[in-house]
């Protein structure tokens, strides 16, 4: 059994309890390079665990290690940054394991886009502002083949989390400006929840310069949208006059 585990964004306490237990028991960990905090392995793995850094391996090599360890009856954890289902390239690994009839499971993790929101103390979904979050990236070297999409997505004026793109912040801003107004808030969070985290806030007008001044050129989330501005409506859910299945409008009870 191979376990794909989300390591969370960086802070080693932001892994799930299930993920931590999987690391406790692992004989072998293959972790995904620079954005998995190596302290997570020191903190949760056995002393004699075998560790591979997948940044230096190709898909075949990763799969070969998995097959070999599995054949020896070893417990393997494939440790991905944030949540494995987002830009994790796990599909191609899972498909290969299916071909080899090797069982696997996936344990989710705290993705960096929600970690970034937590560090900013912001809420992506605000009544009368946005009820939609778009997760995207600029097309990259990995051939996502979706050039031009960011302009299209910007038309929704939703809350946006842009991964893997801070190295081209100028290009991102130019595309966003076609739909969002110039004073739309933008926050760039470098290595959210790590010790060397950096947060830069601005608008579509000034964020590019601020990001350059802060020397941020990788490992960052670009969050965009009026959810970071001042105006919103109060939630109906907690409105005094709003009753629903679990709450009568005029009484609350202590549950425990
Ligand atoms: N699966 C990961 C994303 C992997 S792609 C997740 O769920 O977060 C790698 C990109 O994710 C980085 O280029 C950056 O845009 C973002 N990222 C990952 N960890 C981050 C962190 N701690 N702070 C800010 N951005 C991060």
Image (tube, rainbow, N blue to C red):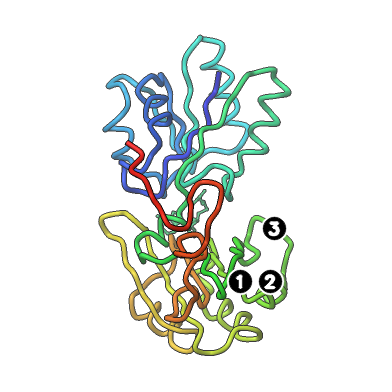
* Nearest-to-viewer mark from 1 and 2: 1
Residue at 40 percent across and 53 percent down: it is 251
Q: Residues within 10 Å of mark 3 (few under 14, many from 20)?
A: few
* Nearest-to-viewer mark from 1 and 3: 1
Which tag, 1 or 2, sits closer to the chain's start? 2
User: Circle 2 is placed at which residue position?
Assistant: 153
Is 12 left or right of 147, judged from the image as shown?
left
Label ID, residue 171: none
Contact between marks 1 and 2 (CB within 8 A): the answer is yes
User: Circle 3 is placed at which residue position?
Assistant: 143
Where residue 221 sits: x, y (%)? 46, 64
Q: Secondary structure at mark 1?
A: loop
Residue at 38 percent across and 19 percent down: it is 25
Gap in angstroms between the C-alphas marked 1 and 2 = 8 Å
Nearer the observer, 113 or 141: 113
Q: Secondary structure at mark 2?
A: helix
Where residue 90 sits: x, y (%)? 61, 39
Quadrant containing the C terminus is top left
Where residue 103 sits: x, y (%)? 62, 19
Gap in angstroms between the C-alphas marked 1 and 3 = 25 Å
User: Circle 1 is placed at which residue position?
Assistant: 158
Residue at 38 percent across and 77 percent down: it is 201
């Amino acid at each position: 059994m191979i376990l794909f585990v989300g390591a969370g964004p960086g802070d080693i306490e932001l892994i799930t309890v299930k993920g931590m237990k999987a690391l406790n028991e692992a004989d072998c960990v293959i972790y995904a390079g620079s954005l998995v905090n190596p302290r997570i392995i020191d903190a949760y793995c056995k002393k004699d665990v075998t560790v591979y850094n997948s940044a230096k391996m190709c898909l075949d090599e990763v799969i070969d290690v998995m097959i070999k360890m599995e054949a020896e009856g070893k417990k393997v954890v494939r440790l991905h940054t944030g949540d494995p289902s987002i830009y994790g390239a796990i599909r191609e690994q899972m498909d290969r394991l299916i071909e080899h009839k090797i069982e696997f499971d996936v344990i989710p993790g705290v993705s960096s886009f929600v970690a970034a929101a937590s560090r900013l103390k912001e809420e992506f979904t605000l009544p009368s502002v946005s009820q939609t979050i778009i997760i995207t990236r600029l097309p990259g070297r990995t051939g996502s083949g979706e050039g031009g999409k960011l302009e299209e997505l910007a038309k929704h004026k939703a809350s946006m989390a842009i991964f893997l793109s801070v190295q081209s912040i100028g290009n991102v801003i130019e595309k966003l400006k076609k739909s969002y107004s110039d004073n739309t808030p933008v926050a760039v969070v470098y290595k959210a929840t790590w010790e060397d985290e950096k947060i830069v806030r601005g608008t579509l007008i000034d964020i590019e310069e601020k990001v350059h001044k802060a020397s941020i050129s990788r490992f960052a989330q670009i969050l965009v949208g009026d959810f970071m501005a001042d105006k919103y409506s109060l939630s109906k859910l907690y409105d005094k006059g709003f009753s629903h299945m679990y709450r009568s409008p005029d009484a609350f009870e202590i549950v425990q």
